């Protein structure tokens, strides 16, 4: 059966079996079938493809690497979430040949968060960094029209404080294709930068993504202080 969006579903809803995956090759499977194969058995009352569809939620598979472990655990359970996170990390290491590099420029931030540059809705993200500016986590703080009410300092800094990260980079996308900051963008950046100073977690930059373009508050001289 084929859904209207072009995603292929198997008749029994289970996705490709391990033997079928080996026989057909992973390149022949769609995103849902590959994710279902990684997840293994679904919780009682569900099937693997339905669980895979709920995790993707209409987004490209590349965005799975940016989903918070907490959300993965809530949707798939701890064992499946751990299996998926391990698979994603192995895939990343196989492609990059090593550990994650430091984010040393807005261009590096653009590459790191590239899957969100073409998202149809605005996503406000925080990248948690260690003292060497190596990313520890990318968290989706809010989805929808950006405003001060949606991006509250409590939501931005709560997990950063709990995980003792050294600094943050703020990121959001403009579906319009124009990366120029709006008055709301400027207000939110100023507000969060001041909160970061109070809690001891520096906001290194706020990068706005728009297709292949970006805007950096740091590059534009709109953030005070040294980048670390």
Image (cartoon, helix red, strand yellow):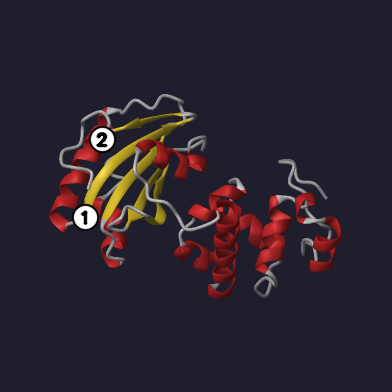
Q: State the count of labels.
A: 2
Which secondary structure, mark 2? loop
Give the side of residue 167 with respect to residue 141, left or right.
Answer: left
Residue 58, relative to residue 78: is it above or below?
Answer: above
Residue 122's x, y, as percent?
Answer: 43, 38
Please report contact status of discs 1 and 2: CB closer than 8 Å, yes or no: no
- Inspect this view and state whether residue 145 appears: no
Quarter-wise, where is residue 107 in the image?
Answer: top left
Residue 71's x, y, as percent?
Answer: 48, 62
- State the residue at coordinates (65%, 73%): 43
- State the residue at coordinates (26%, 53%): 167
Specify the label residue 218 is tagged with.
2
Residue 218's x, y, as percent?
Answer: 26, 35
Residue at the front extreme of this rendering: 97
Residue tagged 1: 201
- State the residue at coordinates (57%, 60%): 88
């Amino acid at each position: 059966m084929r859904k209207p969006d072009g995603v292929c579903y198997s008749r029994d809803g289970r996705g490709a079996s391990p033997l079928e995956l080996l026989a057909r090759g992973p390149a022949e499977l769609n995103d849902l079938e590959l994710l279902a194969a990684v997840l293994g058995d679904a919780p009682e009352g569900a099937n693997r493809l339905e669980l895979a569809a709920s995790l993707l939620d209409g987004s490209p598979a590349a965005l799975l690497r940016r989903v918070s472990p907490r959300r993965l655990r809530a949707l798939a359970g701890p064992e499946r979430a751990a299996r998926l996170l391990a698979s994603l990390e192995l895939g990343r290491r196989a492609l990059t040949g090593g550990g994650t590099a430091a984010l040393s420029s807005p261009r590096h931030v653009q590459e790191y968060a590239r899957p969100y540059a073409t998202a149809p809705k605005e996503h406000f993200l925080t990248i948690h960094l260690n003292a060497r500016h190596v990313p520890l986590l990318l968290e989706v703080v809010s989805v929808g029209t950006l405003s001060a009410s949606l991006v509250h300092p409590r939501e931005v800094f709560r997990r950063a404080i709990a995980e003792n990260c050294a600094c943050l980079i703020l990121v959001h996308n403009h579906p319009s294709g124009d990366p120029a900051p709006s008055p709301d963008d400027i207000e939110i950046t100023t507000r969060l930068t001041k909160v970061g100073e109070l809690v001891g977690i520096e906001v290194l930059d706020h990068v706005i993504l728009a297709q292949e373009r970006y805007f950096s508050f740091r590059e534009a001289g709109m953030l005070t202080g040294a980048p670390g």
